[in-house]
């Protein structure tokens, strides 16, 4: 139980629930082999079953930093992903961090624990492909 909480699995499974509300198929906590030969842990992989489209999600129970954006972007590039989301419990992510994330095709959804489920589902843009 302690490992479950310390590893943020609770958060990853909560995001999985949100993604499934959007009629996405999901995988939680997968290690994916990148083109570089390095294994990358991906918190959530979401995809539409009948479409050739998927995106990756990172779950952060802390402030989002530039380093987090660059690491997640690097994972996406190595695996072959073109877009992603960072779900964070943090409030008020800076404009600079959001701008950097958007430049890497990553959307940040902040203050996840305080938002209504319907708002969170709507924050996942279907046209974000």
Image (tube, helix red, strand yellow):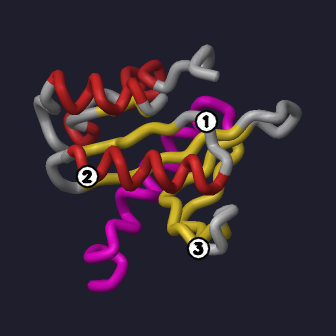
Please tell me the numbered disc located at residue 67: 2
Instruction: Relative to 64, say whether 24 is above or below.
Output: above
Location of residue 40 in the rendering, given as x and y in whole percent from the top left corner: 54, 68
User: Which element carries disc 1, helix, strand or loop?
Assistant: loop
- Asked if residue 129 lies in the magenta stretch, the reply is no
The answer to whether the residue labelled 3 contacts the one labelled 1, judged by CB atoms less than 8 Å apart, is no
Q: Which residue is mark 3?
A: 39
Q: Secondary structure at mark 2?
A: helix
Distance between the Cα atoms at labels 3 and 1?
18 Å
- The answer to whether mark 2 and mark 1 are in CB contact below 8 A is no
Please name the residue shown 63% across and 67% down the image. Answer: 36
Q: Residue 82 — which label?
A: 1
Instruction: Please report the bounds of the magenta region as a residue range.
Output: 1-24
Instruction: Report the disc number at residue 90.
Output: none
Residue 53 position in % (x across, y down): 74, 34
Considering the whole magenta stretch, tell me its main secondary structure.
helix
Q: Considering only vertical position in the picture, is 15 above or below 105?
A: below
């Amino acid at each position: 139980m302690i490992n479950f909480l310390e590893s943020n699995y609770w958060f990853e499974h909560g995001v999985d629930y949100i993604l499934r509300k959007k009629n996405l198929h999901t995988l939680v906590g997968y290690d994916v082999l990148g083109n570089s030969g390095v294994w990358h842990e991906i918190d959530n992989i979401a995809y539409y079953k009948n479409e050739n489209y998927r995106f990756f999600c990172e779950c952060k129970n802390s402030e989002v930093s530039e380093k987090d954006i660059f690491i997640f972007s690097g994972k996406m590039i190595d695996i072959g992903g073109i877009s992603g989301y960072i779900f964070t419990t943090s409030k008020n992510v800076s404009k600079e961090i959001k701008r950097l994330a958007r430049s890497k095709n990553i959307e940040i959804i902040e203050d996840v624990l305080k938002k209504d489920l319907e708002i969170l589902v709507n924050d996942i843009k279907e046209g974000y492909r």
